[in-house]
Image (cartoon, rainbow, N blue to C red):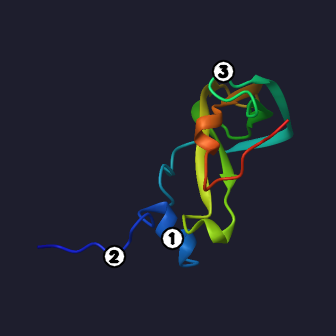
Amino acid sequence: MVRYSENLEVGCRWYEANGVEPLFPFGCGLSYPDFACSDPSVRRIHPDRRNPRHWVVSVEFTITNTGDVAGKEAAQVYVTLPEAAGEPAKRLVGFEKVDLEPGESERVSVIVDPARLEPPAVVVRA
C-alpha cells in the first residue's frame, strides 16, 4: 500500500505551501512569449439561480502579449482562502484562453460560478 501525505498540496500547490520557487513552473516553456495583466475589475452580474443570496461574478482584465512571438495564454482567476479553511491558499475558479500576436491586447472576462466559491471558500454576497 502506498500512502500519500500531500493531501491537496500536489504540484503547484506543494511548491507554494512549502515556499519553493520551481526553476520552470508548470505550463512555462522556454519558447513561449510573456504576458502581462492589467486593469482588473470585479462586478456582480446576477443572483445565482440555485441560491439567490449568492451572486455570479465577472472578473475582467486586460491581457497583453509582451513577447516577440504569437502565443496562447490561459488567463486564470483564483480566490484566496483563509488559513482556517484547511485547504490550499488558492482555488482556481475560472479561466479564459486567449490567442495574441506580439504587442496585442485583449479584454478578458471570466465568469465565476458561485458553486466554486462554496465553503470553505469566501462567498460573495449581496
Q: Position of residue 88 (x, y in %)?
A: 55, 64
Q: Earlier in the sequence, mark 3 or mark 2?
A: 2
Please report the residue visible at 65 percent of the width from the left and 53 percent of the height from the top.
121
Q: Can see residue 81? A: yes
Task: Give the residue pinned by disc 3.
Answer: 49
**Mark 1 burial class by Cα count in 10 Å: few <14, some 14-19, many 20+:** some
Please report the residue visible at 58 percent of the width from the left and 78 percent of the height from the top.
19
Depth check: give the residue in front, 41 or 106: 41
Task: Give the residue pinned by disc 2.
Answer: 5
Depth check: give the residue in front, 22 or 125: 125
Which element is circle 2 on? loop
Mark 1 vs 2: CB contact within 8 A: no
- Give the number of the mark in front: 3 or 2: 3
- Give the number of the mark in front: 1 or 2: 2
Q: Earlier in the sequence, mark 1 or mark 2?
A: 2
Task: Give the residue pinned by disc 1.
Answer: 15
- Give the number of the mark in front: 3 or 1: 3
Q: Amino acid at mark 1?
A: Tyr
Q: Can see residue 69? A: no
Q: Position of residue 102 (x, y in %)?
A: 70, 30
Depth check: give the residue in front, 101 or 126: 126
Q: Amino acid at mark 2?
A: Ser
Please report the residue visible at 62 percent of the width from the left and 57 percent of the height from the top.
90
Which element is circle 1 on? helix
Q: Is residue 88 above or below residue 53?
A: below
The image quadrant that residue 62 belongs to is top right
Q: Amino acid at mark 3?
A: Arg
**Mark 2 burial class by Cα count in 10 Å: few <14, some 14-19, many 20+:** few
Instruction: Tell me if 108 is positioned left or right of 24 in this view.
Output: right
Q: CA distance from mark 1 to mark 2?
A: 15 Å
Quarter that holds the N terminus: bottom left
Q: Is residue 33 above or below residue 18?
A: above
